[in-house]
Amino acid sequence: MEVIRRLSQRFTPTPLAGKPINLYKTPQFLHSRTPIIQSQHKPILNPNRPFSSSTSRSPASWLSGFGMIKKITKLPRILQAGHPVLHEPAREVTVEEIGSDRVQKIIDDMVQVMRRRPGVGLAAPQIGIPLKIIVVEDLKEYIAEAPEEENIAQDRRPFDLLVILNPKLRKKSDKSAFFFEGCLSVGGYRALVERYLEVEVNGLGRDGKPIKVEACGWQARILQHECDHLEGTMYVDKMVKRTFRTVENVDLPLANGCPKQGVR
């Protein structure tokens, strides 16, 4: 799920570290070679798992120039709407697969890709992996970009990184709300989507142990958005169609007959 930015912040989006990037450029290839720049975030590593050859230091993977040393690694691109993997259900991760280097590397990549865009959630199908894995995180820095009254209306509060495999989501009440949503796989657009206000998610952590998350407000919305991806459903499949618009027009009045933003 994409970070919702205000109008004044939509034209020079900046990742948490490094130079500004274009959030809305449609990727042409699934992978690209992207320089890793020092970040304020700690590396997403499993302390019980040794460094793999893809993350360990080797002379061939380091470049020096102008007194700076940068590591070059390959990260997946985010697929855009229309790619088949985004519109088909993903499969569950088996118990045997959870501890594998492949699945752990997928999780590491997902977290890095999500943070670089930046986003508040990402599902494995969005990077071309048809597995039921989601990562979600909402930081104070992102929340500070929105007006305080908007954060209050959305019940939006920061929460730490969550990695959930094979998540199963259920609503805890019938209360719902309409708010604008964006998606990293539908770059440059927004629409009103109705979501439940309280949900519970059960699944497995990256260590294979059971995890249970009870969420409300904006965190509940993020979890519903990402769990939908695992079923091949995107927010455009659930949106109020007449509210679909570009990010530049997100603050314009809604058409007659459209539901108002807020709790129902």
Image: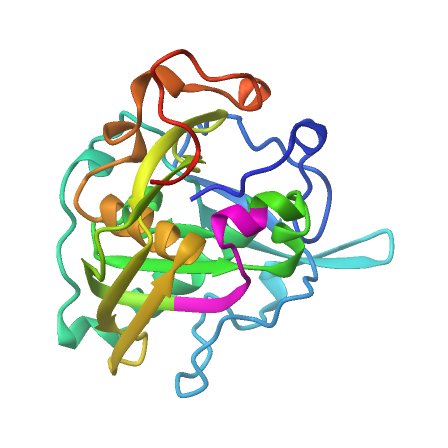
Query: Which quadrant would residue 216 be assigned to in this image?
Result: bottom left
Query: x%, y% of residue 179?
Result: 42, 37
Query: x%, y% of residue 227?
Result: 25, 52
Marks counted in the figure total 0
Q: Residue at x 16, y 49 (%)?
A: 90
Residues 261 and 104: in front is 261
What colour scheme has been applied to the protein in the rendered image? rainbow
Magenta span has 160? yes
Q: Residue at x 56, y 71 (%)?
A: 43
Query: Which quadrant would residue 185 be assigned to in this image?
Result: top left
- Can see residue 116? no
Residue found farthest to the top = 256
Q: Is residue 36 left or right of residue 67?
A: left
Is 252 above or below relative to 31? Answer: above
**Quadrant for the C terminus in the image:** top left
Q: Is residue 5 left or right of residue 125?
A: right
Magenta span has 3? no
Residues 16 and 52: in front is 16
Residue found farthest to the front = 264
Q: Residue at x 45, y 71 (%)?
A: 53
Query: x%, y% of residue 260?
Result: 41, 28
Query: x%, y% of residue 169?
Result: 20, 60
Residues 122 and 51: in front is 122
**Quadrant for the N terminus in the image:** top left
Q: Is residue 230 left or right of residue 102?
A: left
Q: Residue at x 15, y 76 (%)?
A: 96
Residue found farthest to the bottom = 48
Magenta part of the chain = 151-162
- Can see residue 192? yes
